[in-house]
Image: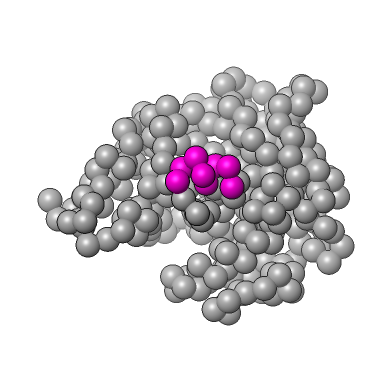
């Protein structure tokens, strides 16, 4: 098969895995290598973009981006030196306490994050913290529900990138705080269920500062010709370890200065 045919076949495989709730094998095993004329990263993003384009053509609405692999320890584990990104669609968004059906997911996990809501486009070739602050309407507490279409979460960089950065659902809190009024690095986080704390972290765990992640994403999107736009939601990355969701229940993320947000799972 040609490289384009391999990309289409893998994109189809991931679509089927998601729609049938049946995970597939690692994508990296199907990378053609040097014969493809592409790097592994380019190959993975080509798969992701094909499925993103398909969803848009089917009528889904793109509402932002998520940033993944913002932990240096996880980057080292996967042998990479950069984060990754995925697309967020309106169909992924859930309100605080709006039930998320486990029956629609495969092997979900939750992580607490800081989300930015943009008020202005980010179109410079190289952005600064000041650019991000000026373009952002607010920061809010968020929970991202990640879900791998790869069996047993057996992923490397190429696998999660192709799989839309393992994105699935997200919940945004109600308290909106201007970036000028908060130090994101100092935001302590706890993620709990029924009062039991399952994960702890802080803003500094996200590439040292969630704004570092936002700058990286803004630059990358301009490079790709798809800059971040006013109204976009940006999930800047996990503040602490992920927590597996194996049964119905409610997970509460509390982030200093941003309040709380709850993700509730039903059968």
Report the side of 143 relative to 56 (left or right): right
The residue lying at 74 percent from left, 49 percent from top is 203
Instruction: Report the residue that reaches farthest toward the bottom.
Output: 124
Query: Foreground residue, 258 or 206?
Result: 206
Depicted 230 relative to depicted 208: above or below: below
Instruction: Report the residue that reaches farthest toward the left.
Output: 1
The residue lying at 73 percent from left, 50 percent from top is 204
The residue lying at 61 percent from left, 42 percent from top is 144
Over which residues does the magenta segment extend? 72-79
Chosen colour scheme: one colour
Q: Position of residue 216 (x, y in %)?
A: 57, 64
Query: Foreground residue, 120 or 85?
Result: 85
Asked if residue 170 shows in the view, the reply is no
Depicted 230 relative to depicted 13: above or below: below
Depicted 238 relative to depicted 220: above or below: above
Q: Position of residue 58 (x, y in %)?
A: 38, 55
């Amino acid at each position: 098969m040609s490289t384009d045919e391999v990309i289409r076949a893998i994109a189809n495989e991931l679509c089927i895995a998601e729609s049938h709730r049946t995970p597939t094998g690692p994508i990296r095993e199907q990378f053609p290598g040097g014969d493809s004329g592409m790097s592994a990263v380019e190959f993975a993003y080509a798969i992701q973009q094909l499925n993103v384009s398909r969803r848009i053509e089917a009528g889904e609405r793109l509402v932002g981006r998520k940033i993944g692999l913002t932990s240096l320890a996880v980057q080292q584990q996967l042998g990479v030196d950069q984060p990754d990104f995925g697309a967020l669609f309106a169909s992924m968004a859930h309100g605080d306490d709006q039930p998320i059906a486990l029956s629609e997911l495969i092997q979900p996990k939750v992580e607490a994050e800081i989300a930015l809501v943009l008020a202005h486009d980010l179109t410079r070739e190289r952005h600064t913290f000041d650019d991000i602050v000026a373009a952002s309407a607010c920061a809010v507490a968020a929970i991202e529900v990640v879900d791998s279409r790869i069996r047993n979460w057996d992923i490397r960089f190429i696998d999660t990138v192709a799989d839309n950065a393992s994105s699935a659902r997200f919940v945004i809190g109600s308290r909106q705080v201007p970036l000028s009024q908060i130090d994101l690095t100092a935001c302590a986080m706890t993620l709990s269920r029924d009062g039991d704390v399952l994960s702890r972290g802080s803003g500094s765990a996200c590439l040292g500062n969630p704004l570092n992640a936002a700058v990286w994403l803004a630059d990358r999107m301009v490079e790709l010709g798809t800059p971040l736009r006013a109204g976009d939601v940006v999930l800047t990355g996990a503040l602490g370890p992920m927590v597996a969701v194996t049964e119905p229940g409610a997970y509460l993320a509390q982030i200093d200065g941003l309040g709380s947000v709850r993700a509730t799972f039903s059968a």
